[in-house]
Image: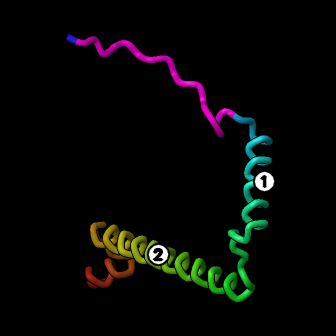
Amino acid sequence: MTDNTDQKAPRKPRGFAAMGPEFQREIAAQGGRAAHRLGKAHRFSSAEARAAAAKRHAARNEQRAAEDAQTAANDTKANADAPQTTAPEEADEHEGR
């Protein structure tokens, strides 16, 4: 029977993960410059940027509205489950005072 209690030593990071943050940033910047130089990088026009921002804000607003609706539904359910009590003034009216 195989004994599964033996654990392998953790691997050392390889490739990009083994590099320091400054070196990673330098390599990424070189890639970005190369993409622009070759014409492969996309540059947003101001109209495209506005459309992307509007789409992002609309999605965020929809998500917030859904969260608010869920919170309201949970609050309504919690209030419905709570025992009903009468205010002291209403209790006095029911007793005929």
Determine the residue located farthest toward the bottom in the rendered image. Answer: 47
Instruction: Residue 68: give its label.
Output: 2
Residue toward you, 83 or 25: 25
In the depicted structure, whether residue 24 falls above or below residue 37 = above
The colour mode here is rainbow
Q: Specify whether 83 is left or right of 49.
A: left
Q: Where is residue 65 drawn, in percent x and y? A: 48, 79
Residue toward you, 65 or 60: 60
In the depicted structure, whether residue 82 falls above or below residue 14 = below
Question: Is most of the magenta stretch helix, strand or loop?
Answer: loop
Mark 1 burial class by Cα count in 10 Å: few <14, some 14-19, many 20+ = few
Q: CA distance from mark 2 to mark 1?
A: 44 Å
Under mark 2, the amino acid is Asp
Residue toward you, 34 or 61: 34
Q: Is residue 36 magenta?
A: no
At horizontal 55% and vertical 75% (from top left) the residue drawn is 60
Q: Specify whether 94 is left or right of 63.
A: left
Mark 2 burial class by Cα count in 10 Å: few <14, some 14-19, many 20+ = few
Do callouts 2 and 1 mark residues in contact (Cβ within 8 Å)? Answer: no
User: In which quarter of the view is residue 89 placed?
Assistant: bottom left
Residue, disc 1: 30
Under mark 1, the amino acid is Gln
User: Looking at the figure, which quarter contains the C terminus?
Assistant: bottom left
